[in-house]
Amino acid sequence: MRALELRDVSVFYGAVRGVEHVDLHVDEGEIVSLLGANGAGKSTLLKAISGIVHPRAGSIEFFGDALAKQSAHRRVRRGLVHVPEGRRIFTTLTIAENLELGAYGIQLGRGERADRLREVLEHFPILQRHFDRLAGTLSGGEQQVLAIGRAMMSQPKLLMIDEPSLGLDPQKIDIVYDMLEEVARLGTTVLLVEQNVSLALEISARAYVLQQGSIVLSGDASTLAEDPRVADAYLGKVNDVPE
């Protein structure tokens, strides 16, 4: 089943094009990557899907239902959750408090929230070990793990995550990517925005490559990993590479 489908989506900031004529889909249970250089439009697409910005044209469907008239908080309640670039955790609150806030948008009762917290900690034990620490005292990698765990508190059907490896050392990146694979194993569909091409393609089933606001390549991750045009898309040369 299609978890997410975009048809001919265009987003503009005034007269400035963010993305234009984008078609993509994510099937239920997949990890799909959205790749591209800075400014390619990756974050804009996630914001359009989550309801932070509104497309000028095109349609977005979530499990077959149109999202055009649904607010951002309504999309969260339906299971569409966005972890933005930079993590955006509450640094003056504890890990426990950050996690509990993750369930706020779906209005779980106290007992249900406690059950959900136990489940998240069971699957992501690194958070259990630092449960009472202030989030601001965590390393960048630990904060990214917390951001993912907080998102999982809202029981997402689709988790969108923007640049999870940004600014992390290799060891912490491995931990974060192990978490993303665990998220998928638990049955949550993942749309991953990433500049680290090799990492993203390693865990993804399929990928799309954005260049200057348009999809220029798409296909199976294993095929794209061998395609020289993927690297060239980051240099603005994709249209110059022969088929």
Image (cartoon, rainbow, N blue to C red):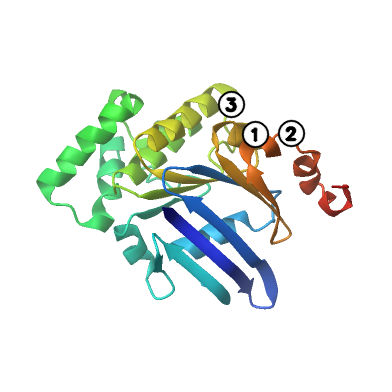
Residue picked out by circle 3: 169
Where 230 falls versus 72 (above or below)? above
Of pointers 1 and 3, the one earlier in the residue sequence? 3
Task: Give neighbour class at mark 2: few <14, some 14-19, many 20+ (Cα, 10 Å).
Answer: few
Residue toward you, 39 or 206: 206
Real-space Cα separation, disc 2 to disc 1, in angstroms: 7 Å
Q: Secondary structure at mark 1?
A: helix
Marks 2, 3: nearer the viewer = 2
Residue 120 in sight: yes
Q: Tell whether 79 sits left or right of 59.
A: left
Q: Work out whether residue 28 or residue 82 is closer to the camera in this orientation and state it.
A: 28
Which amino acid type is shown beneath numbered disc 2? Answer: Glu
**Quadrant of res 206:** top right
State the residue at coordinates (26%, 50%): 103
Residue 53 visible to the viewer: no
Residue 111 % position (x, y): 10, 44
Residue 211 coordinates in the image, percent (x, y): 73, 55
Q: Position of residue 231 (x, y in %)?
A: 77, 40
Separation (CA) of disc 1 from disc 3: 25 Å
Residue farthest left in this picture:
111
Q: Position of residue 141 (x, y in %)?
A: 48, 31
The answer to whether mark 2 and mark 1 are in CB contact below 8 A is yes
Which amino acid, by three-letter code, is at mark 3?
A: Asp
Give the residue at mark 1.
Answer: 222
Q: Which residue corresponds to the image point at 38% horizontal and 43% vertical from the top-left?
A: 188
